[in-house]
Amino acid sequence: MSNPRVRKIADRIQVIVAEMLERRIKDPRLGFVTVTDVRVSGDTQQATIFYTVLGEFGAEEAALQGTAAALESAKGLLRSEVGKQLGMRHVPSLTFIHDALPETARHLDEVLAKARAADEQVAAQRASAAYAGETDPYRKPREDDDEDADEHAEVAGDPAGRTDSDEDDAGR
């Protein structure tokens, strides 16, 4: 649908179908329908209309099935009205598909809420947590060990800290 003409036709079909569903289609099975998107094939022979149905919580499946049946029965009237208003020689055939986008968005919101709750729980645990070892886990150079080694060497009689075995190795 990269062609600008096809895009304009799709936008116009969306407006026409939404107005027809609001004003002229009086089927009692038709719930509160929102036309979310229309996709038209490149040769403008097929138009896929995506819709959502706002239903009562718990009765969404029944409202969806009733709306699907009502749209299927009104397909001919909608197609003839689209043909009249577009003024095209070949009117695209209409296919209605329930849009799963709201359910997917709702599921993502639930997953994000669970992740947010887990993050808050971890943050609460972190506030009362203590280090397993010392507060500074890095080793520091031992200054007192170096001083002890120097004192031990001076006691042995050599201020440089060499031992007798070092002198033997140097003489060979």
Image: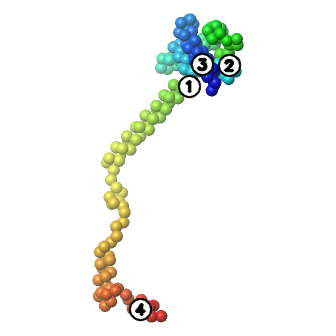
Upstream in sequence: badge 1 or badge 3: 3
Q: What is the secondary structure assignment of the residue under circle 3?
A: helix
Earlier in the chain: of badge 3 and badge 2, it is 3
The reply to whether residue 74 is visible in this rendering is: no
Residue in the foreground of this view, choosing between 110 and 94: 94
Which quadrant is the N terminus positioned in? top right
The answer, for residue 124, to whether it is visible in the render is yes
Q: Earlier in the sequence, mark 4 or mark 1?
A: 1
**Residue beneath the point at 50% across and 17% down:** 55
The residue at 31%/87% (across/down) is 159
Quarter of the figure with residue 134: bottom left
Please say if the residues under marks 4 and 1 sit with CB atoms less than 8 Å apart. no
Residue receiving disc 3:
8
Work out how far the residue at label 4 is from the one at label 3, CA to CA, in angstroms. 96 Å
Disc marking residue 44? 2
| Disc on res. 167 | 4
Q: Quadrant of residue 114?
A: top left
Q: In the image, residue 58 lies at what x, y percent?
A: 49, 20
Q: Earlier in the sequence, mark 1 or mark 2?
A: 2
Type of amino acid under label 4: Glu
What distance separates the C-alpha of mark 3 from that of mark 2?
11 Å
Question: How far separated are the C-alphas under marks 4 and 2?
Answer: 98 Å
Drawn side of residue 112 relative to residue 126, left or right: right
